Image (cartoon, helix red, strand yellow):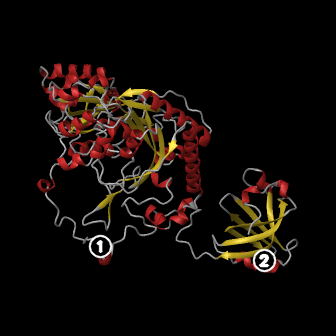
Amino acid sequence: MRTHTCSELGAQHIGQRVDLCGWAQNIRVLSDTLVFVQLRDAYGTMQLLAEHSRTAGFAEQKRLLERLGSDTLVGVSGTVVRRPDGAARGKGESREIELLVDHVRVLNRALPLPFNPHSTANLPGEDTRLAHRYLDLRRPELQRNIRMRSQATMAVRRFMHDSGFVDIETPVLFKSTPEGAREFLVPTRIGPGACYALPQSPQQFKQLLMAAGFDRYFQIARCFRDEDLRADRQPEFTQVDLEMSFVSKGDIQRVVEQLLQHVWGMVNGMRIEAPFRRMSFAEATSRFGSDKPDTRFGLEITPAPQLSGDSDTVTEVLVIPGGAAAFSTKELAPLTDTARSSQANGESKLTSMHKVRDGDVAGLGRSTLLARWLAAGAGPQASGSRLTDLLDTFGARSGDLLFVSERSAHVTPANTTLGRVRSLAAGLLRDRGLLAIPADRFDFLWVEEFPLFTREADDACGRLSATHHPFTAPVEDDLPLLYTDPARVRGQHYDLVLNGVELGGGSIRVHDPDVQQHIFHEVLRLAPDVEASFGHLVAALGHGCPPHGGIALGLDRLVAVLTGSTSLRDVIAFPKAASGRDLSVHAPAPATADQLAEYGLQAVRKGAGAASENERGAEMPRPAHGR
């Protein structure tokens, strides 16, 4: 149907007769003797021209062209001609030419579109665009994103193949095992109540592959989690999954660094430096209030033990330079809202915001830690002197914002209140031109030495859960603590962070079946049926499984960074909406009564007939970083 695509044509084709196919746009009837149409295909655009003095059968061609609706699909034939001097548009050799049309055929006439995907000024809301995703995907931005995703995926496959990894598919129909996130169940007709589960990750299968002796495995793996959605989360997602035998964490990190160097070079033509910076979990959370810090800017958190004598409380201070002078109370509302919500969620005990003015501070309500600390001073004069000294200690000046926060010392601080405030404040300062955060700077960071277990309650005796997943090996030096004080054990886990985004995480795995059984039974105290669900893995570890480890990188997040997208939905061809529904095909859809009966199921109102916690027994606690 076509001899060329729009992007293939150039000055070298002048005088040649060609056939093109594409969508008609920008139909312009300039006069009774001249018509222009922009033709777009998947590869570029070409201007079509029908002119009375040069087009055979001009009247018929003009009639067809001027009646075309936007995005009507057409096939055209004609001769490539050079544009008049000064009429060239855009960049590249192909913009010097246009197609003098002598034959037009309508391949599929488009009905009026729900929205114009080529008009960035009048795009509707996301739900409308997702409901007509095939139109939304016509936008050049999304076309670019999906093509870059293809490039990145091919670059990953090429590198992994050349590095000796074997591409192995693992089952999509698995079984329910409590690794952290809520799972999707798939009913079957095998037996009453029998269900598969869609895998949260190939974690257990890739460990079984190491026991099988494959040594180097990788997969572009589909994963599923039935969780509440955000801009950076989807119920089905893709990860670059790999596992290696007889390795240390440094071996795995070097492979990942080389992989990302290859991907960045192939997709963006950029060179990134390696090895990447390394930082302990304790340092990341104490300096930046997050286990995935954006290190492109300062705004570091400062410990303030002098403000609290309580050994069960951690007190910290964050200074936002110029924040009080630059922003109104209304503009600071997102910061105060974050502080309030973190208290409601138990993330912090109390976080207060103060404006610094000429050696004094505002916002000294009675309940604030700073007010209590000042009240403990000997008289007003002494209090004033103490405050001045304190502000000097933290480098707070007039016009700055001062945040003071206290949190429990027993709860693992994966993301503290001040970490969230820091990120929001950085965005406000950047938008005002008061903080430089280069968009083209890529600060890769390995965050290491996570606590192997996390306290679930705000006390020293709270139940422990796996910080990441229960298969992570302890740091070798901490192995004795696993049997005496497991809360102090560090894990051989490593997260890869880029500009405040967690690209992925991995670990050296437990390969000793006795250690794995001890973690299940004595540390996590799993219910017998939950512990039994991992029996296949423990058995494999006991049959000569080598030391091994791996990592999973989020392909969706990786492509989002490469394309500069703020939402994963912009780099996935057919994503779910924020509600978790696919609005383009109206999924999920209710099953019929006959379909449910075939599986021995019936639909009940949510909450009706739900088993109590005592009836269900002790479940496995959800990891704070479940993957």
At a point 45% along the width and 38% down the height, the residue shown is: 430
Q: Which residue is mark 2?
A: 61
Secondary structure state at the residue bearing disc 2 = helix
Secondary structure state at the residue bearing disc 1 = helix
Residue 362 shows in the view:
no
**Residue 393 against residue 246 in the figure, above or below:** above
Image quadrant for the C terminus?
top left
* Labels 2 and 1: the sequence-earlier one: 2
Circle 1 crowding by C-alpha within 10 Å: few under 14, some 14–19, many from 20: some
**Residue 41 against residue 435 in the figure, above or below:** below
Which of the two residues, 463 or 317, is positioned nearer the viewer here? 463
Residue 307 drawn at (x, y percent): 20, 25
Query: Which amino acid is tagged 2?
Result: Gln
Residue 122 shows in the view:
yes
Q: How many marks?
A: 2
Query: Which amino acid is tagged 1?
Result: Leu
**Image quadrant assignment for residue 357:** top left
Q: Which residue is mark 1?
A: 596
Residue 573 drawn at (x, y percent): 51, 58
At a point 70% along the width and 65% down the height, the residue shown is: 39
Which of the two residues, 560 or 399, is positioned nearer the viewer here? 560
Residue 317 drawn at (x, y percent): 28, 29
C-alpha separation, residue under disc 2 versus residue under disc 1:
57 Å
Q: In the visual, does 598 lie left or right of 275? A: left
Image quadrant for the N terminus?
bottom right
Residue 169 drawn at (x, y percent): 46, 50
